[in-house]
Image (spheres, coloured by chain):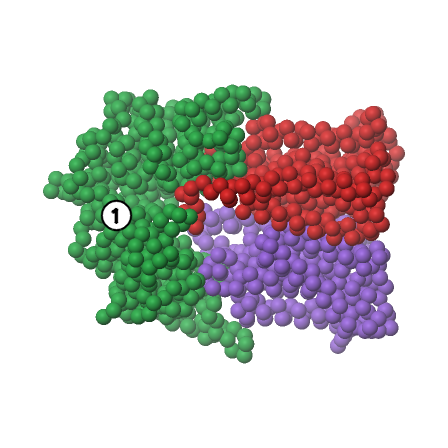
Chain colours: A red, B purple, C green
Amino acid sequence: MAETATTLPPAPAREASRFDVKAFLTRYGAWIALALLILVNLAITPNFATWQTLNVNLTQVCAIVIVGVGMTLVIATGGIDLSVGALMAIAGALAPLIFLGKLFPLPHPAIGIALAFVLPVLVTGFLGWCNGWLITHLRIQPIIATLVLFIAGRGIAQVFTNGNLQVFNLPEFQFIGLGRVFGIPFQAVLMVIIVAVAAWMLKRTVFGRQVLAIGGNERAARLAGIPVATVKQRVYLISGLLSGIAGLIVIARNSAADANLVGLGMELDAIAAVAVGGTLLTGGRATVVGTLVGALIIQLVRYTLLANGVPDAAALVAKAAIIVLAVWLQRQGQR
Amino acid sequence: MTASATLKTLQTIGRFGVLLALVALIVFGWLRYENFLGTYNVLSVLRYNSMFALVALGMCFVIITGGIDLSVGSTAALGSVVAALASPYGAVPGLLAGLGAGLIVGACNAFIITRLNILPFITTLATMLAASGCALLLAGNQSVSVSYESGFTELGQGDFLGFPIPAWIAIAAYLLGSLVLNLTSFGRTVLAIGGNEDAARLMGLPANRVKALVYLASGGLAGLAGVILAAQFGAGQPIEGVGWELFAIAAVVVGGTLLTGGVGSVGSTLAGVLLLGLIFNILNFENGLGWISLSAYWQSVIRGLFLLLVVAIQARLSVRAEQTV
Amino acid sequence: MAPLLSMHGINKRFAGIPALRAAELTVEKGEVHALIGQNGAGKSTLIKILTGYYAKDSGEIVFDGRPVAFTSPQEAQAAGISTIYQEINLVPYRSVTENICLGREKRRFGLLDWRSMHAEARALLARFDIDIDVHRPLMAYPTAVQQMVAIARAIGFDAKLVIMDEPTSSLDEREVDVLFGVIRQLKSAGVSVIFVSHKLDELYAVCDRVTIMRDGRTVQVAAMAELSRLDLVTTMLGRELTQVLQEGHKADDDAEAGEPVLKVRNLAVGRKVRDVSFEVHAGEIVGLAGLLGAGRTESVRAVFGADRPDAGTIRLSGAAGAISQPADAIRAGMGFCSEDRKLEGIIPDMSVRENMMLALMPQLAKRGIVDETRSREIVDQFIRRLGIRCSGPEQRIRELSGGNQQKVLLARWLCMNPRLLILDEPTRGIDVGAKAEILNLVRELAGQGLGVLMISSELEEVVEAASRIFVLRDGRTVAELEGDAVNEQTVMAAMAHGHEETREAVHG
């Protein structure tokens, strides 16, 4: 069939119009779903339209969105990153060790806090780069290459902290998770900035376009002179950096770092947000803003169910159904 | 290196590499620790690892077809809860209930993957969430005690002919699995699909049906593992099973099964399970000696490194095979 | 005696476009029948209709004395038609026995009876004098043996008709001899064979009769012995020998001067390219001619750094270092349009603008940020200059017709100001009007000093456009034709016979 497909004339008008409806749904389906969810909530959930509801939902969704942005870029190249949750745990374990002075003596507390922001993120970025190296140089499938750190990463974090809970109270550091700017949680501001920068990068920079070109047709991209290996490695590097930031936010929010729990299940949440947001899981078409919307949808569904007395566990089943439905709809739209 | 030499190396790693590592580890433990090969230690290692062995067996079949099943951990948790709920009615109803729960999850996977044509990875990720949600719902967010009167706990804690019953179950499952893979056309079709799905279809083999059955079996085995979990620890545990899928994948891969599908063996998967299980056991003994103190957390680091090593070797060899063929 | 197979008046359309028009194919019992034709001539469609892969629109098929209409390859196999595909469609990791017996296993007490399956596999292979360990995985054996296993599997189904689709493309000469031995054995056992190949030597060595297809029609059926090589090539390409030489408007011959832009000597890549040499000067269109499988595409891919050559030298004037990947080639001033637009050319979900700017984008960018204004100017300019029909630069490229997609891909390279442009089948799957436009454009560009290396299976095109043609045959350069010597007659002669015999064919 493939050989004849190239010589096909343009599809007749009737089919074209049907395709448009599908294209419209694949494109704006997530937005429509989000709007519907908000409307439903306005109708049935008491006290929904309040500042507090917004803040609660935003803080719940921040870490997922930040990790989801990195995941979006990875998936846009046609890959996957399972190690994000484990990387969050590593960053979350390292930061307290640094600012509590357990790793090395600190000349000044301020330096400790600065290093606690920078070093963990650099470490997770480096580990992300290692994922990319395995994928591009050893040609290991992304799912397996990142599985290694998925398994070992949390163990590394646990070994650092000996599995102990690290409790702390350090407002300067915790600003990243608890601080507010004009009443808006700082983490939400950070999230919006990251989403905006990533969306801009994907759209306007050479790197962003090359990411999409690789996901869209890797062979063509290579023949057009795009440095496929370099671009892919950078994408995993970015995913690692963002996971580190998310890890810091989570421990700051909790005033405690528990290597057993930080980022647990995050890879699933991030992939779910990406899929629901309308990014093609096979690569080549990606929307960072869509990932934000996808994460909000998943969070809002959970919130709606909880606020209306449905147990949290049932929300998991709903999330599963949403993922399958979103991917299935995506496939339908492609045909 | 020629393609045949490559394959030979791969198979040697698969068949004997893991066995050699296992033997080396056992000899190491035997020389170093008192009671390492004592009846108590051996039997408890077998008892504990039999659940992982069951999950890994299902995973082995799935991976041979070139797929993956991330839902096995939650499915086992669901199985343990359902079995615990059914345990007052006796050992057999408890067993069947847990198995049935696993089969239902497996059937969902099979349907979504073969009918809706959604990638196994995404599908089982979703069912992983769903199974875990169902387990929490049924259990009411806490562990469910099993009935100790009905004889259900024998399934996990009992012995038969001086050998733990869970280990008997696992051994029976592996014998059956080996028989199916090697001596039935179903098993050979599983291998053919993983080797080249298009070719398998052109050969007229029922690829979709076989794939569906493989996911069904994986779900069923995970459910069975859940039954043993509940019986062994006296409770159905809705939040257990986190990370089991990765343990299973690691065991299968360390056993030399190719992640791209088409090559694999049931026996070396068992060896992979025991190898990864013994690492944990030896860490315990090592800490008992008191020379060095390695926390239990090292085990996942070591497992990850094992996985990395095996995958890197596989990748090097297959890159070379590509260049020479 | 009635023929084993007769396909009569077969019609087939894909989305309204005829792929077969009253095609005919008759195969006698115990004969080896060659089926040849260019890409798109309809031979694979015809075979796929026979084996039940496609349904025919009209026509009748009589096989073994009764009318048939298979609906699946399995059905055709059950009736005695076995197909061996070009790419060996077996499972490499599994044992030889499994590859032969899968799908019709022997059982004892409900379990597989490995002993009798091994015995059957050995017995089947013994018919071809192949004595190998059937327990070992298929990939442990060389390609030729794998091909034999595929054939053993095929005839193990008690085939009456075996279809071989380019079975020799991955075999070396010695292995081909073994295969031919097998074909002769099949023949003497009364099995018929349909043999698809582009290598003339092979056709003459093993086939009894030939069916030649062109544009979906059966244009000639003849005994192999009665047809000269030149006649065969001529009929296949649809050119009459008596046709007058095209005087053609060549690219300006005067432009050719000085050092060549590209000089390739004794290139070898894998099995397909053994000893290829050619060169391209500035302002010159050079054609690479040859039948399918002659090694044209493989050669130019190596030149562009897409594949790694095993031997030979590739010298690009002014190139700094060695070319080991496409990015190097592009930096050195090369552009390459692949023969497979869909698989290796377009990024379907991206816009016309982005597809066009893909290679230039990094150079145009300031600090890594895409220069939208400049890129839009350039794209607008090329859309106008090449006459690309699209709703605008932001339209997705997948929605464009093949010809317009190709123009976008040409523009992808032209905006880089290359010194050498490699075009692999630039007009494949493109309608007549767009074809002419593209060829005119290429000529114009050469006139401005661009070196062009062009591959086309449409001989007419190459002869018309190129001022110099290198003819490849079985991975070797067999002729270099220049000036007056460039005409369809000489090229076809070289494709059919190689250089030595060309002179005889032309002058004799």
Q: Residue at x 29, y 27 (%)?
A: C284
* Count of picture labels: 1
Quadrant in which the C terminus of chain C appears = top left
Q: Residue at x 29, y 67 (%)?
A: C4
User: Residue C17 in the image: x percent, y percent?
Assistant: 38, 47
User: Residue C62 in the image: x percent, y percent?
Assistant: 32, 66
Residue at mark 1: chain:
C
Residue B37, located in which quarter of the rendered image? bottom right
Q: Look at the numbered disc 1 and give the secondary structure of its residue.
A: helix
Residue B31, located in which quarter of the rendered image? bottom right
Badge 1 density bin: few <14, some 14–19, many ≥20, Cα 10 Å = many
The answer to which of C67 and C190 lies nearer the viewer is C67
Q: Which residue is mark 1?
A: C236
Q: Residue at x 61, y 64 (%)?
A: B213
Residue C243, located in which quarter of the rendered image? top left
Residue type, mark 1 in image: Met
Quadrant in which the N terminus of chain C appears = bottom left
The answer to which of A84 and A117 lies nearer the viewer is A84
Would you place residue C328 above or below residue A38 in this image?
above
Q: Is residue C200 left or right of residue A218?
A: left
Residue B9 visible somewhere in the drawing: yes
Q: Is residue A67 left or right of residue A224?
A: right
User: Residue B161 in the image: x percent, y percent?
Assistant: 75, 77
